[in-house]
Image (cartoon, rainbow, N blue to C red):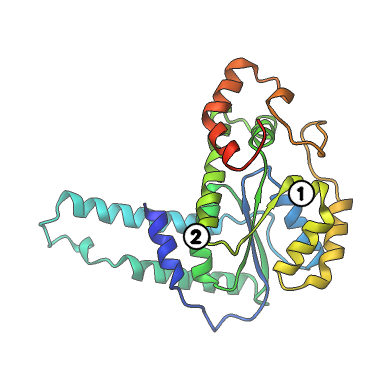
Amino acid sequence: MAETALMEEAQSAAGDATLPDGLKVFIVGSARSGTSILFLALHTVFRLSGPGESHVFPIFARMIHEFYMYRENLVAKDIKNKRVLAYRLDTRLFRAHLISFLRSFYAQQFPSGAWLDKTPGAEAILATPLILSAFPAAKIIATKRTGVEVVRSFGVKFSTSFEENCRAWAGCMGALQQTVERFPDILVVDQFDIANSPAEVGASIASYLGQPERGAELGEFLRETEISRSSTHSWQNRMTLTDVDWGEHGKSTFERLCGPTMRRFGYPL
């Protein structure tokens, strides 16, 4: 898989000493899993600037993937024809040029060398190795949430189909598991804990970002700030299939597409 190759390359990536020092924070995770409240909290408490959403790194990760796949398909189709100019393209060199461009782009956008970057979705999670190649000192916070709640929230907020919503959540969680296995130092935060244990979450995030003295303020912000919600279900309990009106077919579809992932992450069905 191209993503695996990117992860392996990230392990040996060097930093860029020309960038200013500063706190570089990337928030990734499934949509509707707490990325927005964390963005608002870090923007307010840590005074980090950044757009509401970024989507920068998924673009470049996709470019590298397409580059890699197109070149590999050429080799597979015509391995004996060494006159094809594309054979001379170096994947690592192409990737290095993109990383250099990314560093310049972020330096231009954030002259202070500090920023807050939020992008939900599986592609953003899988872009972690590219993020760490460009910015080895970056702090990555990944959010997660039980599939029943996310899929239900998708159905209220987005116009995508139920099956698409199920696949989107399962894809994000699969990407998260794969990424955490390779990069165990990233911080994973469950939205359930944001709602029910804001002080602990605030302390954990502040410590992870190297500023533990701001933990209490961050926890207080998370406690007092209203989280956007699409149901009256109590945040004190995780939503299960008994709490939704999807019908037998919908629940069966969810079980088929999301059940294994729910169990793997310890979420109740």
In the rendered image, the residue lying farthest to the top is: 248
Residue 155: quadrant of the picture: top right
Q: Mark 1 points at which residue?
A: 193
* Rendered image: mark on residue 134: none
Secondary structure at badge 2 equals helix
Query: Left or right: where does residue 58 sit relative to residue 74?
Result: right
Image location (x, y in percent) of residue 118: 65, 56
Query: Left or right: where does residue 165 sit relative to residue 152?
Result: left
Q: Residue at x 38, y 60 (%)?
A: 5
Image location (x, y in percent) of residue 194: 78, 50
Query: Across the whole image, how many numbered discs are drawn on residues?
Result: 2
Q: Residue at x 86, y 50 (%)?
A: 225
Front residue of 135/89: it is 135
Q: Which amino acid does label 1 sit on?
A: Asp
Of the image marks 1 and 2, the number of the one nearer the N terminus: 2
Q: What residue type is labelled 2?
A: Arg
